[in-house]
Image (cartoon, rainbow, N blue to C red):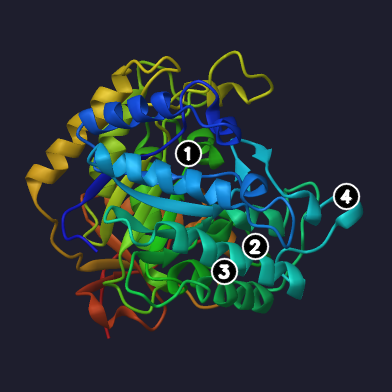
Amino acid sequence: MSTTVRFGVNYVPSGEWFYSWLAPRWDRIRRDLEAIAALGLDHIRVLPLWPVLQPNRTLIREAALIDVRRVVRLAGEAGLDASVDVLQGHLSSFDFVPSWLSSWHRRNMFTDPECVAAQAALVEAVHGAVADLPNYLGLTLGNEVNQFSSRPHPTPMPATPEEVGAWLDALLGAVPSDGRGVRLHAAYDAVWYQDGHPFLPTHASRYGEVTAIHSWIFNGTAQHYGAMSQPSVRHAEYLIELSRAYAAERSRPVWLQEIGAPLNCLTESEAPEFCRRAVLAAASSDALWGVTWWCSHDVPRALGDFPELEYSLGLFDAEGQVKPIGKAFAEVAAEVRAGGRPAARTTAVRIPAALDRAALAPGGAVFTAWMDAAARGERPALVLAGDGHRFEQVLPPAPSGTAGVYNAVSAT
């Protein structure tokens, strides 16, 4: 992994959104990628649709793999590295689950042995299709696949934490040990914040070679504190440090794989400044590998039934013109690259043993303690109870229901 913070974007093809995987427009894709590179970004995240890749449990379409390879190759020609996701899965409020897992053929993707084997075969095939390309960064199992395992999904496929661990082992283990690219998985923030969710913080922080963070302030942070408040601007930084508390090694790289400026919380005029402040806050963590903005291009208004915010998340508009937030992201990327890496943190908020995950969430005791320490000008980490020996000072979490004033105690 690079020692310089990387900056890229989740690639949403202009014009026809991810539906373009049905019949890629190569001239348009080439133009998109060249525009992304012209912003000064260095990588993209590629998200092909699962039913296009694997429409039948025992059929992986060679033509679809060739299309994925061509997108990665075109990215390289534009000067961009590329990571590839496999199980898409879920994108912008739509599910793309193949028919062999739904309705009359409904089976559990996490626990059915034949379905797990089919997913592992697809993971191996996607990696094999692109692993020899020099700009291949690595493979993510899928986009926020944990949302299929529990509420609030309307038709979840239940699994226990043990079954989740076995599923992750099977799919991550399907990538050959060829030294090409990194293997990881990505979860939305229920893994950190939702009590009873079968994907655990330890799954996020200890499986695969990198921890992926997806930071969205419409999860309650903006509603509770305000969209431009310190807790909203520093939410990604908090998640990065929270993930490190559960990692086996604090040196494990953390990839801020999704962060955006949702206009259901922010105004259009606030979005560029939110981008700048949020990225600078995230970059204050010495574990940060890179920031990949969501997303490259706005969803065209001609496409129906998207939540309103999805039409405005791009760095470019639907016609490919750079938006003010695109310029802001390019500028803050250059600023971070020029600034060098931050020092390690020496103060930490302690996470008590056997704590409900709600205490980690916005408004919870641990979240409050960390944000209060940050407001006092400290650069707090987070640490599990009994693991404070790596810090000069350890602060207790906020007492439930209180604002809290904390006296640092000597670490033991």
Disc on the earlier residue, 2 or 4: 4
Disc on the earlier residue, 2 or 3: 2
* Separation of marks 3 and 1 at Cα, in angstroms: 21 Å
Q: Residues within 10 Å of mark 3 (few under 14, many from 20)?
A: many
For the residues bearing labels 2 and 1, Cβ distance under 8 angstroms: no
Q: Residues within 10 Å of mark 2 (few under 14, many from 20)?
A: some
Q: Position of residue 343 (x, y in %)?
A: 13, 61
- Residue carrying label 2: 195
Toward which corner of the image does residue 355 lie, by quadrant?
bottom right
Under mark 4, the amino acid is Ser
Whether residue 268 is situated above or below residue 345 in the rendered picture: above
The circle drawn on residue 300 is none
Q: Which label lies toward us, 2 or 3?
A: 3
What residue is at 20 percent from the left and 38 percent from the top?
A: 333
What residue is at 60 percent from the left and 44 percent from the top?
A: 49
* Separation of marks 1 and 4 at Cα, in angstroms: 33 Å
- Residue carrying label 4: 103
What residue is at 59 percent from the left and 48 percent from the top?
A: 88
Instruction: Using residue 330 as the reference point, say whether residue 354 is left or right of it.
Output: right
- Residue 359 shows in the view: no
- Residue carrying label 1: 217
Label 1 sits on a secondary structure element that is helix
- Residue carrying label 3: 200
Label 2 sits on a secondary structure element that is loop
Which of the image's four quarters has the C terminus? bottom left
Disc on the earlier residue, 1 or 4: 4
Under mark 3, the amino acid is Leu
Under mark 1, the amino acid is Ile
Whether residue 175 is situated above or below residue 368 in the rendered picture: below
